[in-house]
Image: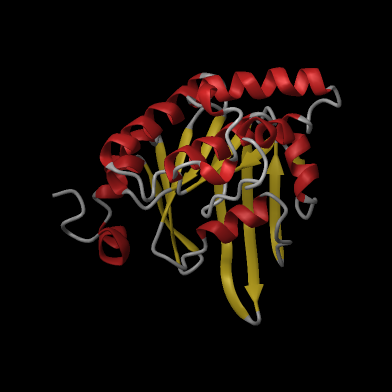
Amino acid sequence: MALLEVKNLTKFFRGLRALNNVNMEVDKGEILGLIGPNGAGKTTLFNNITGFYRPDGGQVLFKGENITGLEPHEVCQRGIARTFQLVKPFAELTVLDNVMIGSFSRTSSRTEAWQQAQRMLDFTGLPDRDEQLAKELTIPDRKRLELARALATEPELLLLDEVMTGLNPTESAAAQELIRKVRDGGVTILVIEHVMRAVMSISDRIVVLHYGEVIAQGTPKEISQNERVIESYLGRASFA
């Protein structure tokens, strides 16, 4: 059984179909890339999976349980966490306090939340930033903070929304290594990304969305050679 199943998911906004009968599965232990042009419905799909939007049709199943329409905190408690395309730290709180907020989804103990937050800061490479205000961080470190806060909820499935966009090559390479490290630690990952070299490198499989529909699924090699994907999104010079 797949860890996550999306079945015929449909979403309308003011009569416009943002998602049209989307079907896909995420297998336990894999990194699944989700790509497509701007406006394809990628973040809308994330929002429907995690409870920020309520779909107009279809189902979302997690570990075989129907979680369609649950509130975001309920989805999180079941083991799904996410980051956002536009990072959203609590700017006036310290880095440590930001991550502790994620920890409190699993414990009411301040001591346990502090310990979990410290572990996640160490894991994501921010141990020396714990007392710094979130608003003072660079963009790469804000992305690490958002990842640390999501991991503090102890997810089984982690949804990453453009965590490498805007990073330089060195920062992107470090982010890819961190994502692999998260997966190697037992967390399944679904990642939206526009940096093609990065997503092709880290993904076991890729799903391509276009105008709210899945137009292709397969290995990175299969996707890079798919004529419909090349014409609609990648272009002939994507990997030159």
Which color mode does the image show? secondary structure
* Rendered image quadrant of residue 152: top right
The reply, left or right, for residue 149 in relation to residue 29 is right
The outermost residue toward the right is 108
Residue 27 seen in this snapshot = no
Q: Position of residue 229 (x, y in %)?
A: 31, 59
Quarter of the figure with the N terminus: top right
Q: In front: 207, or 165?
A: 165
| Residue beneath the point at 71% across and 57% down | 52
| Residue beneath the point at 34% across and 36% down | 171
Q: Position of residue 122 (x, y in %)?
A: 54, 19
* Rendered image quadrant of residue 116: top right
Q: Position of residue 170 (x, y in %)?
A: 28, 35
The reply, left or right, for residue 226 in relation to residue 83 is left
| Residue beneath the point at 72% across and 37% down | 64
The outermost residue toward the left is 240
**Residue 170 vertical placement versus 89 (above, below):** above
**Residue 230 vertical placement versus 156 (above, below):** below
The reply, left or right, for residue 223 in relation to residue 236 is right
**Residue 34 vertical placement versus 124 (above, below):** below
The reply, left or right, for residue 178 in relation to residue 128 is left
Q: How many marks?
A: 0
Q: Position of residue 218 (x, y in %)?
A: 38, 44
Residue 220 seen in this snapshot = yes
Q: In front: 95, or 37?
A: 95
